Amino acid sequence: MSAMIKTKIHWDIGTAYDLFISLRILHDPERYGVRAFWAAGVRSRIPVDHREVLNRASILRLVPLTFVNSLNQPKNSTQLMAKLRSIPAEEILETLAIQPDMPEEIKNLFLRTTAGKKWTREEAQSLIQRFGIEDNKQTKQILTNYYEVWSNRKEFGEKLILGLQAYVDTFFAEEEQRILPVLEQELSYARMRAGSRPLPAMLEELTAGVRYGDFEHLSDIILAPTFWGSPFMFSEHPTDTKMIVLFGARPGTMSIIPGEIVPDALLRGMKAMADPTRLRILRHLAQEPQTASELSRVLRLRPPTVTHHLAQLRLAGMVQVYLDPNGERKYAARYEGFEDTQDLLNRFVRGE
């Protein structure tokens, strides 16, 4: 039976998704193609004490898709904060930071962490592997931050709620009014396209080039738009047979910065094509799909260098990513990205 018939599609919408994603991006702007000075300006509006709490929480990369999906409509900041206040402070961190698909080993490690029980070397190593923490001079500080947060769950939970409310009051309450009409429009477009496309092809279009190799095991997939997360996708598995996917829903003509007339997508595309190494990578990927390690060997580049350039090309929508059932990623040139950048440049210069 085909994935299109077997897998049932559900649709969701809520600015609460973007609340968490925007916080993640504001604390790591360069990775997501956002101007660092503007992100710093947004963070500076938050009172110092609350800003520090949100900064510490940023290591957790909180994007609790299953939790937000469980909220009643409208899934906005008001609904989110009301729900969080109904949860005991000592359970806030568990609610937001432990995903349903997190390995039991990691989940149990966090939940049994106390102020009097330090992590062993083996436990610390498991966290490094799970969260992709680079093993360098900053590793010890990152692990210390994780430990301090989890060993003081109640106190941190209380402060986190106050920090999130401060973020809503100083920035996001106004921001969600700006992005909600866009989310509604993009969701409507996606639903119209869904009727005529097989699920893998539709998802590849919505995520600007991500193709999954296997949907056979999924009984349900929940699709929701994100303004701030564009062009990336965010996903989570509430159960083994259920998947939540957030797809990018910021039009190519819009910027993440309110009032900015130069579209983000245009800047990302121009930046991606202005680097000779990235052009060499695209030329190889146009010939045949390759993994990052294969590109590293062919181009004689260090793996971290290839990974960096692929991330920039993915940000610009110029590479297609194929995720096979074993978790391996293969990349191919995505010609739609070249065409979109050229079209955006023509339209911007002409003032259209």
Image (spheres, rainbow, N blue to C red):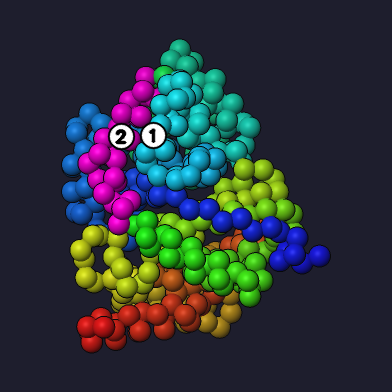
Q: Amino acid at mark 1?
A: Met
Q: Which residues are magenta?
A: 155-178
Q: Residue furthest top?
A: 116
Q: Which residue is mark 2?
A: 165
Q: Which mark is residue 81?
A: 1
- In this view, 74 is above or below 261: above
Residue 153 vertical placement versus 309 (above, below) = above
Q: Nearer the viewer, residue 50 or 298?
A: 50
Please name the residue shown 40% across and 49% down the image. Answer: 15
Overall secondary structure of the magenta section: helix
Residue 320 visible: yes
Give the quarter of the figure containing the N terminus: bottom right
Secondary structure found at label 2: helix
Say if mark 1 contacts mark 2, CB within 8 Å. yes
Tell whether position 172 is magenta: yes
Q: Mark 1 or mark 2: which comes first in sequence?
A: 1
